[in-house]
């Protein structure tokens, strides 16, 4: 039930209150006043010319509810913004209009409810009434509301006194109106012997619970967020939030905790001198609270979990959801009752058919009895006639014998006819047995069919649950496949990058190997040149050793060839010769050392190159 439907219920009472003649029409002047008051309490701007323009083609006569509805929807209800007005003010306006006309009570009676209690009961009636006009409440909803009020007053609901009221034909067929309901409450059948203050408190509690969407109220100890001290607060739980005040009068609001699907309730162990502790966790804060006893803690945790569940399911009111469920249960009961009545009618038809066939069978049995009696009478009469004929016609034996033969033939025919009648009766009895067996089989088949239907319903529910589980598993599998594909794509890209890096490293390795091969060739060439140079050095050393012979004064130098024709060998006594010899030996020693070092270095480089670990300058 949305906000528009709730407002229309209250406005319907206001419109009907202005219809003094009960003709279904209200004058335009009264509608102007009603529209202005509605705009005021709904906090929307009022256009006084809109009503005249809307009904410009009509005369100055009254306007029906059907004619007023388009104006109401277009200029008032379409402009209403939820949360911008107080709905209780709208209800009070419509109650004031309708109570003056319809709510007439005896002020001197001690059982009459106060005006405020009657207004709250009127609001409760509108909330629980059916969504059709004129507004009525079915007996089940009346009983539900009375049970809630009795529970709030801590008394047991006794429905014996209301059985006569609910058994009336008008109540059973169409339900009761709000004025009949208020009259029943003012009669004292429910509140007899109970103080009016208790009744007022009970009605206010039920009103706040059902109309105000208050799931639970009461005192709790709350731990502060900054000082971390404990203070007793009055908490009010609604489906969307949990508010707490300094006192039960709810004048000073100390905080408001918004509830959503991310909230949760946990039971805490006793500590800090507090017992029956629990906490409410939100995304930003954790609120620690302490109840008076374990029962209160269980009620509060259950109520908060219910509020969170309603918010997650997208429902704004617990009692609206319960009302829809009760209505669905009533519709299901009505369908079952109709199906049961149809089944009973079918069974009655079968029973009537069976009784008809039994009556036919009784008629056949009666006919058989009559035929048997007639047969016995005929037999007796024939015997008498035979005796008479035997006594009277002793002389005429031949004729008597012929007559006897004819009588015997006739008796045989009669016996055959009687045998046929007996067989017909047996067939009818067998037919009756088969009909009874068929009836029993049909009844058994109906019972089996009902059991199969119940089993089929359970299987369908189980199949639906499994289908939901399968769909969830399929969604998880699809998510996992997408994730695996993404990971596979990332791994493939990484492998491609590594492959490119490996190719680059392979290319660099090939270049290094090519460089190493060129260096090896250079080393081999250098070694070859070194061996040739070493051979040349040895040759020149030999030549030098040969020329080391001293030459005396006046001696001619021997001719050693064109290349050594101008070479002069000094004498041994020449000091320059000794110096040259010494320096030549030192040079030879240095050259031999360098040759040894070069050979060791070349061998080392050759060994490194052969092992593939050649140093690159």
Image (cartoon, rainbow, N blue to C red):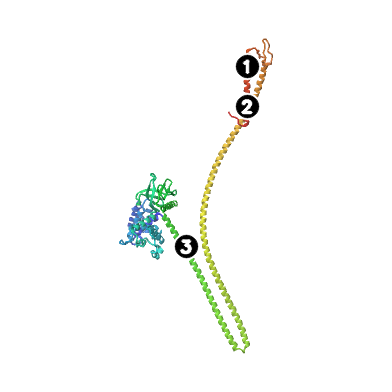
Q: Secondary structure at mark 1?
A: helix
* Residue at x 32%, y 61% (from the top left corner): 110
Outermost residue, bottom direction? 395
Query: Label 1 belongs to which residue?
Result: 582
Per the model, the C-alpha gap separating discs 1 and 3 is 138 Å
Give the camera-side residue of 479 and 77.
479
Per the model, the C-alpha gap separating discs 2 and 1 is 30 Å
The answer to the question of whether label 1 and label 3 lie on touching residues, with beta carbons closer than 8 A, is no
**Residue 334, position as x, y percentages in the image:** 45, 62
Quarter containing the C terminus: top right
Pair 3/2: label in front: 2
**Residue 172, position as x, y percentages in the image:** 41, 64
Outermost residue, top direction? 554
Give the camera-side residue of 276 and 335.
276
Q: Secondary structure at mark 2?
A: helix
Is 354 left or right of 293, judged from the image as shown? right
Query: Label 2 belongs to which residue?
Result: 602
**Is the residue marked by circle 2 packed among few (<14), some (14-19), or many (20+) residues within 10 Å?**
some
Q: Earlier in the sequence, mark 2 or mark 1?
A: 1
Is 56 left or right of 584, judged from the image as shown? left
Q: Earlier in the sequence, mark 1 or mark 3?
A: 3
Is 366 left or right of 29, judged from the image as shown? right
Quarter containing the N terminus: bottom left
Per the model, the C-alpha gap separating discs 3 and 2 is 110 Å
Q: Earlier in the sequence, mark 3 or mark 2?
A: 3
* Residue at x 44%, y 57% (from the top left corner): 325
* Residue at x 62%, y 85% (from the top left corner): 402
Give the camera-side residue of 418 and 113.
113
Give the camera-side residue of 1 and 150.
150
> Which dot marks residue 336?
3
**Is the residue marked by circle 1 packed among few (<14), some (14-19), or many (20+) residues within 10 Å?**
few
């Amino acid at each position: 039930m949305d906000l528009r439907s709730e407002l229309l219920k209250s406005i319907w009472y206001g419109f009907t209150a202005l219809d003094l003649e009960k003709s279904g029409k209200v004058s335009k002047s009264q509608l102007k006043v009603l529209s202005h008051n509605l705009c005021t309490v709904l906090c929307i701007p009022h256009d006084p010319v809109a009503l005249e323009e809307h009904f410009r083609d009509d005369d100055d006569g009254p306007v029906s509810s059907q004619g007023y509805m388009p104006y109401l929807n277009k200029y008032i209800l379409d402009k209403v913004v939820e949360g911008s007005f107080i709905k209780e003010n709208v209800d009070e306006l419509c109650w004031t209009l309708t109570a003056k006309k319809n709510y007439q009570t005896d002020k001197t009676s001690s059982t009459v409810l106060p005006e405020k209690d009657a207004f709250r009961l009127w609001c409760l009636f509108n909330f629980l009434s059916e969504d059709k006009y004129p507004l009525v409440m079915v007996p089940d909803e009346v009983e539900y509301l009375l049970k809630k009020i009795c529970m709030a007053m801590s008394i047991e609901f006794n429905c014996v006194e209301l059985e006569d009221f609910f058994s009336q034909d008008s109540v059973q067929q169409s339900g009761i109106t709000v004025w009949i309901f208020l009259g029943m409450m003012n009669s004292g059948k429910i509140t007899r012997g109970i103080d009016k203050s208790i009744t007022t408190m009970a009605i206010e509690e039920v009103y706040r619970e059902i109309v105000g969407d208050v799931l639970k109220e009461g005192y709790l100890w709350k731990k502060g967020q900054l000082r971390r001290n404990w203070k007793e607060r009055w908490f009010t739980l609604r489906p969307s939030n949990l508010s707490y005040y300094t006192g039960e009068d709810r004048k000073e609001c100390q905080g408001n905790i918004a509830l959503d699907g991310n909230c949760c309730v946990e039971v805490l162990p006793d500590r800090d001198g507090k017992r029956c502790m629990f906490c409410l966790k939100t995304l930003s804060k954790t609120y620690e609270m302490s109840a008076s006893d374990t029962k209160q803690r269980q009620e509060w945790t259950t109520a908060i979990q219910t509020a969170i569940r309603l918010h997650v399911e997208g429902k704004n009111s617990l009692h609206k959801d319960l009302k829809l469920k009760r209505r669905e249960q009533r519709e299901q009961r009505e369908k079952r009752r109709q199906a049961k009545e149809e089944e009973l009618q079918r069974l009655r038809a079968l029973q009537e058919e069976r009784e008809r066939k039994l009556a036919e069978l009784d008629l056949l049995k009666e006919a058989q009895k009559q035929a048997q009696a007639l047969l016995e009478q005929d037999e007796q009469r024939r015997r008498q006639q035979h005796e008479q004929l035997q006594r009277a016609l002793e002389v005429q034996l031949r004729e008597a014998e012929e007559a006897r033969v004819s009588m015997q033939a006739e008796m045989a025919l009669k016996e055959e006819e009687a045998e046929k009648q007996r067989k017909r009766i047996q067939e009818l009895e067998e037919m009756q047995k088969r009909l009874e067996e068929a009836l029993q089989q049909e009844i058994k088949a109906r019972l089996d069919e009902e059991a199969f239907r119940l089993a089929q319903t359970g299987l369908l529910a189980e199949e639906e649950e499994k289908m939901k589980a399968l769909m969830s598993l399929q969604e998880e599998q699809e998510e996992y496949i997408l994730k695996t594909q993404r990971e596979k794509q990332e791994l493939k890209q990484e492998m491609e990058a590594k492959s490119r890096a490996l190719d680059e490293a392979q290319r660099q390795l090939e270049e290094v190997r090519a460089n190493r091969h060129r260096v090896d060739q250079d080393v081999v060439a250098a070694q070859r040149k070194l061996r040739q140079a070493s051979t040349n050095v040895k040759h020149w050393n030999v030549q030098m050793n040969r020329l080391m012979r001293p030459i005396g004064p006046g001696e001619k130098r021997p001719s050693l060839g064109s290349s050594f024709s101008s070479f002069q060998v000094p004498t041994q006594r020449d000091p320059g010769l000794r110096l040259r010899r010494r320096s030549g030996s030192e040079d030879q020693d240095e050259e031999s050392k360098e040759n040894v070092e070069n050979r060791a270095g070349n061998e080392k480089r050759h060994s490194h190159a052969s092992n593939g670990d050649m140093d690159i300058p």
